C-alpha cells in the first residue's frame, strides 16, 4: 500500500514537472514571436487589427499613428507603479486620421502615453498633462490594454479608474474603438512630463522552469523517502543472524 501511494505521488509530481517544461517551451516560442515582431518593419496604420484574434498577432509591432488627441477623455489608471513609486498610467484616446485602405476609418485607439506619480497630499489631485492640439504623429508599439487589477466595485465615471474596458469605452465615446492599444515610446516636442520607462515584454520562461524544478525535486524526495524508510532502514535495524 505504501509502495502504491509513493508511486502515485511520484508519477503525479513528475507529470506536473513535464507539464511545466512544456509550458516553458510554449513561452519560449511566444518570446521568439514577440522579438520577431519587435524587429519587424513598422506596421502601417491601415493594417491595424479590428478584432481581438488579429490584434494579438500584432502585439509589439512598431507603428507611427496619425490622428488627433481627445484629451477631455483621458483616463488615469490608479495603483500603477514605476520603480516602486505609486502613480497613474495616463491613457488618452486618439482619433485616427482616415488613411487609404483603412479597415475602420475614423476609429479611436487608446494610447498608453506614460506614467506620472501620484500627489502625496491629495490622492485625487491629477497633474496637468500637456496635450498637443490638432493633427499629431505618435510613435509607439502595439500592445494589449494595461493589466487588469482587482477592483471591489465598478469604476465611477471620471478620469481616475482602476481598469480600462475597451468595449465600455467605445459606448462612452460613441465611436468604434480598436481592440488593442499603443504604448507611446517618444515624448512629443516640448515634452509632457510623463515617464516612459516601459518594461520589455517578457514571457516568464524562468517561472515555469522554476516550477518544473520544484515538482521534479518533490518527485525525487518521495522516491528517496520511500527507499530509505521502506527498504534501507528496516534492513539496517534488522538484528544480525547468529
Image (spheres, rainbow, N blue to C red):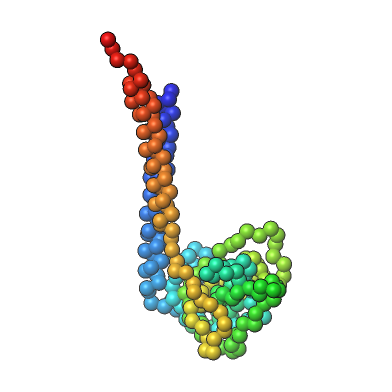
| Residue that appears at 52% across and 89% down | 189
Frontmost residue, 102 versus 198? 198
- Image coordinates of residue 10 in percent, x first then y, are 40, 35
The answer to which image quadrant residue 109 occupies is bottom right
Q: Please determine whether, in this image, residue 67 is positioned above or below residue 220.
A: below
- Image coordinates of residue 150 in percent, x first then y, are 63, 59
Quarter of the image for the C terminus: give it.
top left
Residue 166 visible somewhere in the drawing: no
| Residue sitting at the far top | 242
Frontmost residue, 89 versus 72? 89
Classify residue 21 as left or right of residue 74: left
| Residue that appears at 60% across and 69% down | 86
Classify residue 30 as left or right of residue 196: left
- Number of callouts: 0
Quarter of the image for the N terminus: give it.
top left
| Residue that appears at 65% across and 79% down | 127
Frontmost residue, 66 versus 152? 152
Q: Please determine whether, in this image, residue 234 is positioned above or below residue 32.
A: above
- Image coordinates of residue 42 in percent, x first then y, are 41, 78
Frontmost residue, 230 versus 157? 230
Residue 128 visible somewhere in the drawing: yes
| Residue that appears at 38% across and 68% down | 35
The answer to which image quadrant residue 236 occupies is top left
- Image coordinates of residue 229 in percent, x first then y, are 39, 26
Amino acid at each position: 500500500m505504501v509502495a502504491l501511494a509513493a508511486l502515485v505521488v511520484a508519477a503525479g509530481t513528475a507529470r506536473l514537472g513535464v507539464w511545466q517544461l512544456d509550458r516553458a517551451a510554449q513561452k519560449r516560442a511566444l518570446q521568439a514571436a514577440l522579438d520577431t515582431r519587435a524587429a519587424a518593419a513598422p506596421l502601417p496604420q491601415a493594417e491595424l487589427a479590428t478584432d481581438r484574434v488579429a490584434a494579438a498577432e500584432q502585439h509589439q509591432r512598431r507603428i507611427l499613428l496619425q490622428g488627433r488627441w481627445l484629451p477631455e477623455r483621458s483616463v488615469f489608471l490608479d495603483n500603477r507603479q514605476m520603480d516602486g513609486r505609486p502613480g497613474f498610467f495616463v491613457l488618452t484616446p486618439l482619433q485616427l486620421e482616415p488613411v487609404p485602405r483603412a479597415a475602420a476609418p475614423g476609429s479611436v485607439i487608446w494610447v498608453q502615453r506614460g506614467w506620472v506619480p501620484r500627489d502625496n497630499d491629495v490622492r485625487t489631485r491629477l497633474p496637468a498633462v500637456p496635450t498637443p492640439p490638432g493633427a499629431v504623429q505618435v510613435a509607439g508599439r502595439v500592445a494589449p490594454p494595461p493589466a487588469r487589477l482587482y477592483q471591489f466595485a465598478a469604476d465611477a465615471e471620471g478620469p481616475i479608474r482602476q481598469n480600462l474596458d475597451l468595449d465600455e469605452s467605445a459606448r462612452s465615446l460613441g465611436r468604434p474603438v480598436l481592440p488593442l492599444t499603443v504604448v507611446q515610446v517618444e515624448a512629443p516636442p516640448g515634452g509632457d512630463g510623463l515617464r516612459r520607462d516601459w518594461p520589455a515584454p517578457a514571457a516568464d520562461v524562468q517561472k515555469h522552469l522554476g516550477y518544473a524544478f520544484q515538482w521534479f525535486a518533490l518527485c525525487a524526495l518521495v522516491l528517496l523517502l520511500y527507499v530509505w524508510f521502506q527498504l534501507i532502514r528496516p534492513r539496517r535495524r534488522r538484528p544480525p543472524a547468529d
